[in-house]
Amino acid sequence: MDSKLRFDGKVAIVTGAGGGLGKAYALLFGSRGAKVVVNDLGGSKKGEGSSSKLADQVVEEIRSAGGTAVANYDSVEDGDKIVKTALDNFGRVDIVVNNAGILRDRSFARISDTDWDLIQRVHLRGSFMVTRAAFPIMKEQKFGRIIMTASTSGIYGNFGQANYGAAKLGLLGLSNTVAIEGRKYNIHCNTIAPVGGTRLTEGILPPDLFDQLKPEYVAPLVAWLCHEDCEDTGGLFEAAGGWYGKYRWERTQGQFCRKYIEEEVTPEAVRDSWEKITDFTDAYHPASNHEDTGILAAGLQDLKPWKEIQAKPASATGAVTSGPISAVGVKVGPSSFTYEPKDVILYALGVGASVQDEDGLKFLYENDEDFTPLPTFSIVPSQAVMFGGNLWSNIPGWSVDLTKLLHGEMYIECVKPLASGATLNTSLEVVDVLDKKSGAVMIIDTLTTDESGETVAKAQWSTFHVGDGNFGGPRSSNRLVPLCDPPSRKPDATEEFKTDVDQAALYRLSGDRNPMHIDPSFAAMGGFQQPILHGLCSYGITCRIILKHFCGNDVSKFKAIKCRFAKPVLPGQTLVVNMWKEGARVFFTCSVKETGKDCLTGGYVDIVESGAPAESASAPSKPELASAAVFHEMSQRLAGDPDMAKKVKAVFLWNINLDKKPVGQWTVDLKNAPGSIYEGAPRNGLKPDVTLTLEDADLVAMVTGKLNAQKAFMSGKLKVSGKVMLTQKLQGLLKPQAKM
């Protein structure tokens, strides 16, 4: 994006702006159109004395360059006075950069009460006082950007800076909470840990390094985080010399040191489990308190009373009878659902159908000779049994928390066009539950029949349950209808659809009454600034667009649709649907124009061509392949190294056998950046540079380090044809995958 970031009409307060980092921030904001309050007490770096000189000089510099600024000389402990300066001169406050700081370095044993208290007052209390004074104004405006300034001394600790480090990491906790409480008011709060050559670091940093760490190299990060287009909040960022990075928390999976509820935990038990407690293999990266405690709660739920364990010893059964895996095989229904033309019309309106559309009356007027439901209307009866039945209370060994349920993927198969009104019966079965460590993925199939018992639609729901993972279940399943990446070429068709601000309010009338989509307070509890659009609404809109482009609005030609829900959409935003047709399959992605982020990924629609029935993608009958997890892991590694395709520039075809019989193919396309890995033969006319053939079990053994690749080749277990030497370039993808 080439457009220059501007802050016209915005008012920015920068504390400690008389020099160093604060001055760099103030000058940058002033040069980009913001009205700036330059705050500086004018004291020494130890917090002694005061002067108006420093703030006045910065104000004059901004004004000389054509900007607008006023000075403020108050202590940050008088935050209300600083904010009053902004209101008196400019009438509002949009940005607060809490930058003011001092140093009183002492070794821990020599810190005085004054050394400790003064650092806390300036850094932590000062930032609190300024932010507290500005927060109500930002809340009223429904806009605010706040920066807290931490330090690597707080993140890692530093000799002689116990007082400073404690205050700086305290600011991170303050920032994270302000971010949570401000989110629903469009108030973003982020923390930076800058490394800059300023008066506070002069004499601490080596001279050659000091000269490379100009404050001007930190200021661009602060400007972006304070811009209205930046959506990040609650983040911790480091900046130094033009380099910028983001932190995240990492936590081991840990280890329970008791096996049943009544068991006493001893220090010796902790000692004996220390290796597992400190093992970062498959570590968690919790993004919130809610997620962190959810993971812990899932483990606590698995603890049973001693009597129950005695009554059901592990040796008595080979199956897991508690936790998420106990959901497998649970069935509900059949459940009856009756609809009439007005329900069909209401759904069509909910997914954006209009009388101005080509063939619009076909979906909106009951007296039209071709009146029919849209193909995705079959979601409605399926959803009714999903959330209106007794599924969640019918799982014997697992208490499902619906507040932690996310819709992951969706598949619908249209066996025959739906009638304009009918009574349908839908049954449900949980066919598998996957262990994704940070959560459980439940795969649920539904089957919908008409009154004669004939199948009219099938569906598969993939739901993610936050914090319910790590139960020892499978990582992959042959019951899951697969996703597919789109071709790496220009789309065959693209269409935009601007959703209405009331789109969610309308769509919810078709059955999904989750208050997350209508009530701002519920949306805020879920971490959203405002109610979000139903994922299935975007799904239905996309279906309608593809139906028009590739089926001529003939619902009998629409066979199936599958995709993953990647990012939320806000009502009023514009959807951009890109489509690629290859044979009887239309690949698609759906993104949000205003953000550039994909909201639906891995999508495809199977259509019927020339009157021939399309092959269903559901309920694959082929055997489950352990090697599918290998290619999944390879895909993740490829995503982490987008330059790999530029280095390799080759296509690899993998033929997978079971007992010497071909059962699967995978393509590793590293010829076209950024590369892709998908099931099946090479697409788009590509020919493999290398073909590799081996048994399913041998591939797994090879990538887990149990089978040497060279020995496998020499013994005939691995057959390679084509440009054999290119296989050496696959080492980055094939290095031992111990995590499988």
Image (tube, rainbow, N blue to C red):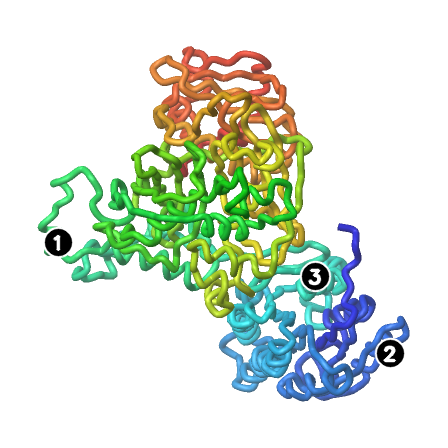
Q: Residues within 10 Å of mark 1 (few under 14, many from 20)?
A: few
Could you tell me which residue is drawn at 37 percent across and 54 percent down?
467
User: As shown in the figure, which amino acid type bears the numbered disc 2?
Assistant: Glu
Mark 1 and mark 2 lie on one chain; the one further toward the N terminus is 2
Query: In the rendered image, is residue 434 in sight?
Result: no
From the top left corner, tell me how far across and down residue 648 is, in percent: 63, 26
From the top left corner, tell me how far across and down residue 87 is, in percent: 72, 84
Q: Is residue 346 above or below residue 620?
A: below
Residue bearing mark 3: 224
Residue bearing mark 2: 60
Among the 4 quarters of the image, the one containing residue 84: bottom right
Q: Left or right: where does residue 352 sit relative to residue 56? A: left
Q: Mark 2: which secondary structure?
A: helix
Between residues 584 and 197, which one lies in front from this camera angle? 584
Mark 1 to mark 3 CA distance (whole Å): 57 Å
User: As shown in the figure, which amino acid type bears the numbered disc 1?
Assistant: Glu
